[in-house]
Image (tube, rainbow, N blue to C red):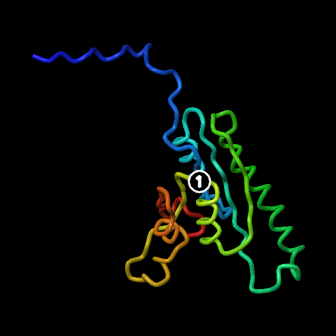
């Protein structure tokens, strides 16, 4: 009969487990619903060695950037302030936090960030899809990121009580 080694005592186990994710991206639209995604990213990053990036993409208009550059700079200033407010949730809880804003088309910018920064998990919120209205509700940003990202994506489905925009 084969004997199996005894399980280690709890005291012999490592004190700080490393997260299975090293780089977590949380795309945010600066609404309160993003708090759930930030909290989940913090939970998944429990332990050492994980970086969480809160990314806000400022959607650009079909005008020359220079013509409304001051407008974009105002949006970026507001976005950085809101990102830091969201990031306060992680204060003293372990993961390194980064705050980034960029300009462009939201889905493309998120997917580019995933590739350029070797992201291994995206945590994003979404509303419930309406089966009777597939053309509009199925092509959400979260749906597109889920389909096209080259890493794992966790989608947090918000019900109307959780989603102030619903």
Q: Residue at x 50, y 61 (%)?
A: 150
Residue 145 located left or right of residue 60: left
At which x and y percent is residue 166?
55, 70
Residue 55 located left or right of residue 149: right
Q: Is residue 67 above or below residue 97?
A: below
Residue 79 located left or right of residue 19: right
Q: Is residue 33 above or below residue 70?
A: above
Q: Which is more toward the observer, 29 or 70? A: 70
Count every numbered label the image shows and give the total. Answer: 1
Residue bearing mark 1 = 118
Pointer 1 local density, CA inside 10 Å: few below 14, some 14–19, many at least 20:
some
Q: Is residue 45 above or below residue 72?
A: above
Which structural element holds mark 1? loop
Q: Which is more toward the observer, 160 or 136? A: 136
At which x and y percent is residue 3?
18, 15
Q: Is residue 161 above or below residue 5?
A: below
Q: Residue at x 60, y 40 (%)?
A: 50
At which x and y percent is residue 122?
54, 56
Q: Residue at x 69, y 67 (%)?
A: 57
**Which residue is outermost to the left?**
1
Q: Residue at x 26, y 16 (%)?
A: 5
Quarter occupied by the N terminus: top left
At which x and y percent is residue 6?
27, 14
Residue 57 located left or right of residue 114: right
């Amino acid at each position: 009969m084969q004997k199996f080694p005894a399980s280690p005592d709890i005291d012999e186990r490592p004190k700080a487990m490393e997260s299975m994710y090293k780089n977590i991206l949380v795309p945010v639209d600066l609404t309160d619903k993003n708090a759930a995604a930030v909290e989940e990213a913090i939970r998944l990053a429990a332990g050492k060695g994980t970086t969480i990036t809160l990314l806000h993409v400022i959607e650009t208009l079909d005008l020359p950037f220079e013509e409304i550059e001051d407008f974009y700079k105002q949006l970026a200033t507001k976005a950085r302030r809101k990102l830091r407010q969201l990031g306060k949730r992680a204060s003293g809880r372990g993961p390194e936090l980064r705050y980034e804003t960029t300009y462009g088309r939201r889905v493309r910018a998120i997917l580019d960030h995933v590739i350029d920064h070797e992201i291994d998990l995206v945590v994003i919120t979404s509303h419930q899809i309406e089966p009777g209205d597939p053309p509009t509700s199925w092509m959400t940003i979260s749906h597109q990121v889920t389909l096209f990202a080259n890493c794992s994506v966790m989608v947090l489905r918000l019900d109307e009580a959780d989603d102030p925009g619903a």
